[in-house]
Amino acid sequence: MEPTRELIDALYREEILEARRLSLGEKLFLGGALFDDLCERMRAGIRSQFPGADDAHVERLLREHLDVSRRLTCGP
């Protein structure tokens, strides 16, 4: 059974309300945790794309991806 649009909207609203209740410190901590999770997912994607890459090569490609993303969102 698929969730209804109303249920999806209600769950999203609850997530927003929960996020608004967090202190600044909690938000900063969670932001760091989200970034760490993003990097792990990106590493997994790089390893999938380049199965023979060693850890140093994966880290180099990750940094390149992050640099491109930073330039696209923040400018040079």
Image (cartoon, grey):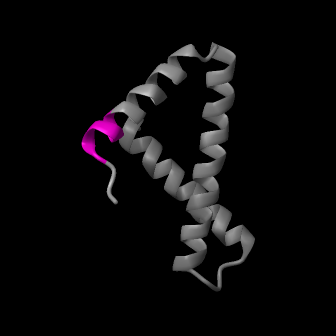
Q: Residue furthest left?
A: 5
**Which residue occupies the extreme right position in the image?**
55
Q: Nearer the viewer, residue 72 or 5?
A: 5
Percent of width and height locating residue 33? 67, 39
Quadrant location of the N terminus?
Answer: bottom left
Compared to 15, does 64 lie above or below?
A: below
In magenta, the rendered stretch is 4-9
Where is residue 51? Give x, y as percent: 61, 84
- Point out the residue furthest to the bottom here: 52
Q: What predominant SS class does the magenta segment belong to?
A: helix
Q: Quadrant of residue 32?
A: top right
Instruction: Please tell me whether residue 21 is drawn above or below residue 47 in the rendered image.
Output: above
Point out residue 14 in the picture as x, y percentages from the top left corner.
Answer: 45, 27
Question: Relative to the observer, which residue lies in front, 18 or 38?
Answer: 18
Residue at image coords 32%, 34%: 9
13 part of magenta stretch: no
Residue 28 figure quarter: top right
In the rendered view of the protein, which quadrant contains the C terminus? Answer: top left
- The residue nearer to you, when weighing 23 against 49, is 23
Residue 75 visible: no
Residue 35 in view here: yes
Q: Quadrant of residue 46?
A: bottom right
